[in-house]
Image (tube, rainbow, N blue to C red):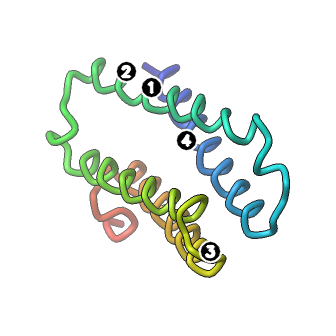
Amino acid sequence: MQILYLLHVGCALLSVTGFALRWYWMLTGNPRLASPTAKRLPHVIDTVLLGSAIGMLVLWQVWPWQMGWLLAKIIALLVYIVLGMVALRFGRNRTQRGIAGALALATAAYILAAAFTKSPLGLFAL
């Protein structure tokens, strides 16, 4: 269980850091954004992240809707994905992409807070 947890936390850190880097590259017009590694590695990391999450749920023998904080994290994850897509692909201009990226990172911070506090209120639970 501890290995799955550490794998999950490590992949989450890599995933959000990688998004922030790719978002910065997009905003600055860096050609590295088009590299094969920048295009493929996020999918590998996110697949391992999802697999470790599912593995922990199986070991805990729970469903996400049985824990409010976990359901909140999943809903926030969907918001993060949509915002990330706008930030990196579908934003019509740099301003839209910039705002979407900042909101995506704020959503990632909420997900982290919900995970640490084990509350859907995140930092407001403290």
Mark 1 — residue? 52
110 lies left or right of 88? left
Q: Which of marks 3 and 2 is nearer the N terminus?
A: 2
Residue under the point 36% across and 66% down: 126
Mark 3 — residue? 98
Q: Which of marks 1 and 3 is nearer the N terminus?
A: 1
Q: Position of residue 50 (x, y in %)?
A: 43, 31
Mark 4 — residue? 12
For mark 2, does the 10 Å Cα neighbourhood hold few (<14), some (14 to 19), or many (20 or more) residues? some
Q: Are marks 2 and 4 in contact (CB under 8 Å)?
A: no
Give the Cα separation between the discs numbered 2 and 4.
15 Å
Q: Which of marks 2 and 4 is nearer the N terminus?
A: 4
75 lies left or right of 47? left
Task: Residue type at mark 1: give it.
Answer: Ser
Residue under the point 18% across and 32% down: 63
Mark 2 — residue? 55
Nearer the observer, 22 or 48: 22
45 over 55 or under it: above or below = below
- Residue at the far left in the pictured view: 66
